Amino acid sequence: MTKIEDQNSTPATSGIILHGARFYDILAWVMMFGRERAFREKLIDLARLKPGDTVLDVGCGTGTLAITAKRRVGPTGKVYGIDPSPEMIARSGQKARKAGLDIVFKNGAIEALPFSNAQFDAVLSTLMFHHLPHKLREAGAREIRRVLKPGSRVLVVDFGGTEQQRGLLARLHQRHCHVKLPVVIGLLGAAGLNVVESGAVGIKDLHFTLATAPCCEQ
């Protein structure tokens, strides 16, 4: 059964919190030119998820990627989603219940992940780092490394800032619209993660970075 924890609590964070769950899915559909389902499936492929994995979606929004991940990891796998917005968490739970999927959603912030050390086989972060100031990105990368099992992986996807945006999307992202690929690679490397693959997603100017946690502590 889908579980929602701390639904009415907004954690303290210096990152931008999106509360418009009602319009979030519509905006995502528009931004992906109606190809959101294919986009989510591609991200799951890039993250190399497999049946039985335990997965965390950081900044899960309305839960679409977490739902896709749960379908990939199957009944033996576990999926958790966190977001600082209670409205997003409520919407995520509704969608997961409608899909008949067992996913745990929590209110939480990337700089203080509410999970124990070395808990996850994979961590996903999609279109979120550009909402964070630099110091918060650094703290978030360290927290992601902390909750990853040795040898497990993290996938970070974001806008690269190479595409000229106009109109509504430009106004929505005029202050924090992108984070360049070398910046993400540097953040994950500084947190002690090993970048194994990076490049263009193939939709708009989105880029991805896949990194792994060290197999053994030095």
Image (cartoon, rainbow, N blue to C red):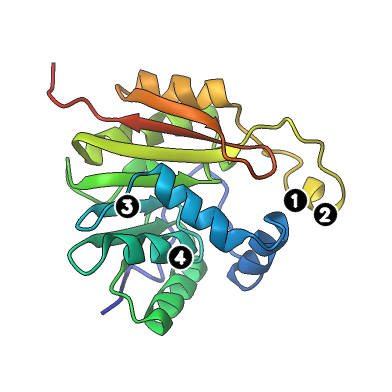
Where is residue 27 shown, x and y percent of the image?
69, 62
* Label located before the other in sequence (4 or 1): 4
Q: Which amino acid does label 1 sit on?
A: Leu
Where is residue 60 shown, x and y percent of the image?
45, 57
* Label located before the other in sequence (2 or 4): 4
Residue at the disc numbered 4: 63
Quadrant of the frame with the N terminus: bottom left
Q: What residue type is labelled 4?
A: Gly
* Label located before the other in sequence (3 or 1): 3
Q: Which mark is residue 168?
A: 2
Observer-nearest of 81 and 65: 65
* Label located before the other in sequence (3 or 2): 3
Q: Is residue 212 left or right of residue 62?
A: left
Residue at the disc numbered 3: 56
Q: Is mark 4 on a helix, strand or loop?
A: loop
Crowdedness near tag 3: few (<14), some (14–19) or many (≥20) residues, C-alpha within 10 Å: many
Whether the residues at callouts 1 and 2 have beta carbons within 8 Å, the answer is yes
Q: Nearer the viewer, mark 4 or mark 1?
A: 4
Residue located 65% across and 32% down the image: 160
Q: What element carries label 1?
A: helix
Crowdedness near tag 1: few (<14), some (14–19) or many (≥20) residues, C-alpha within 10 Å: few
